[in-house]
Image (cartoon, grey):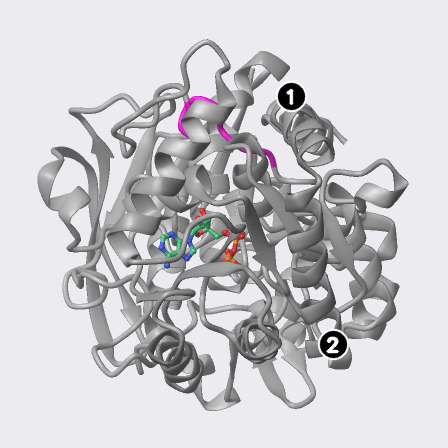
Amino acid sequence: MKKVLHISTECYPAAKAGGMGDVVGALPIYLPQFGVEASVILPKYANKWFTQHKFKTLQKGKFQLGEETIKYEIQLLQNEDLGYPFYCVDIPGKFDRESIYLADDGHGYPDEVERNIAFQTAICEWLTKGKQQFDGLHCHDHMTGLTTFFIKYCPAYKKLANTPTFFTIHNGQYRGIFDWKKVNLFPDFNRKFDGMLDWDGSINSLATSIKCAWQVNTVSPSYMEELSENFDTLTSLIQQEKAKTSGILNGIDPELWNPAADKYLDQHLEKNKWAAFKSYHKNALLKRYGLKSRRPLVGFIGRMAHQKGANVLAEAIGKSLGNKQSVSFIILGSGDKMIEENITRLAKKYPRSVAAIIAYNEGLSRQIYAGCDFLIMPSRFEPCGLNQLYSMRYGTVPVVSSVGGLKDTVPDISVGGNGIAFPQAETQYVTQAIERCVDLYKDKNKFIALRDKIVSLDYSWNQSAQAYATMYNG
Ligand code: ADP
């Protein structure tokens, strides 16, 4: 069997900030049936999951990070079977923090660059000096993508130079751009290849990974197409590298996301009685948040970021409720303070129609998937989007802007599709989409037929895992 190591900063259940964590936690479970044995390596954070688990040290070592001597340990998870070997890199002072990316002030850690370089250097040291060998290295987003450069151009890691590398873009907006002054933090490399690191005069981790990896994929076909048309400063790069690019749609783990057994739900789907399941959870939400009943309940779950269109949603909700639309909303998310305030203000203005929960809460997210009639995703761009897949699995009709993975998974009901689709994240389109939710909800037969259809769709990992296995073999 081919052995592939996933190098990532997130992996559910150890550490997750978004969809990438779900993907890295699930894909390895589905690969062995296609002849690939996958392992995962993560930084060792000081969160609850890591402190509750036991690890065995496999290797200890040190290296220079500029002036600083970094001590690290490679450890292997002992007391839980995730379905694949799970390694972590313990680097005291760098990763022993509770949050994955964000400092207390809500901004990224100021030493993000140092941390990412240290993590990747430790992995290269281990792979060069340790016993474990892999037939492929799979890096996820810019935080781990410099590994593709290190193994190619650092003499110390020459042994790894011919190991195939795979790079997945989960979100091309984040690029890991930093000043050339920080190049002294890198392990020694052949300076003839400075050009591989550079984009527009800075070190650009994302561009470097696209240049150096053997294969590059996005998490949906449409997102790769969109990037090749407009990836702002990187459009020409992605066009140049087209031959090695592809789009592989994410899957979901139907065991972890299972309305018949979800550990976060106090009532499960029984014998496919969807009406009973949905109304139990809807009523629970309405009661808990004091929302009006006998009208559709529309949910939103996600980062309060420009990408997710949460500000457009706030405007559209204001318009819809101002026009006396009979609809309620439940919004769960956190992020941009201005967007959080806009949403909170709406909930104060319309307390019986809008519930706003500014938090990251896995349990509540499951209850929202279970209890809503619709889940709205007015994303400006969406590399894949998992929420629409989870919502369909829980019998909730997705309402999406037709971009990236949303376009690939939610064609509009008018063309025999799976939900309500609108062209883009603009207030007028989102307001119209909300109107369509109200109309569809009134047409009970049509609404229930659509629900019956979406709960039977298969978005499990099998297909995508096969596509990744093909990529590793390519
Ligand atoms: P992202 O761009 O954030 O990675 P995805 O749609 O790919 O978006 O994945 C989002 C994942 O994070 C889903 O599992 C979703 O349920 C979860 N999620 C996002 N925000 C929250 C939140 N506030 N509370 C709980 N889960 C959340």
Q: Which residue is mark 2?
A: 428
Counting other residues with Cα less than 10 Å from the Cα at mark 1, is it few (<14), some (14-19), or many (20 or more)? few
Could you say which is closer to the camera, residue 72 or residue 317? Answer: 317
Q: Alpha carbon of mark 1 to alpha carbon of mark 2: how far?
A: 32 Å
Look at the image and say whether residue 42 sits in the magenta stretch.
no
> Is 271 placed above or below 417 here?
above
Q: Secondary structure at mark 1?
A: loop
> Residue at position x 22%, y 65% from top?
70
The tag earlier along the polypeptide, 1 or 2, is 2
Q: Secondary structure at mark 2?
A: helix
Could you say which is closer to the camera, residue 131 or residue 383? Answer: 383
Give the percent coordinates (x, y) of residue 159: 51, 43
Could you say which is closer to the camera, residue 141 or residue 375? Answer: 375
Q: Which residue is mark 1?
A: 456
> Residue at position x 86%, y 56% from top?
242
> Is 66 placed above or below 150 here?
below
Start and end of the magenta stretch? 251-259
Query: Can residue 1 be seen here?
Result: yes
Give the percent coordinates (x, y) of residue 163: 59, 40
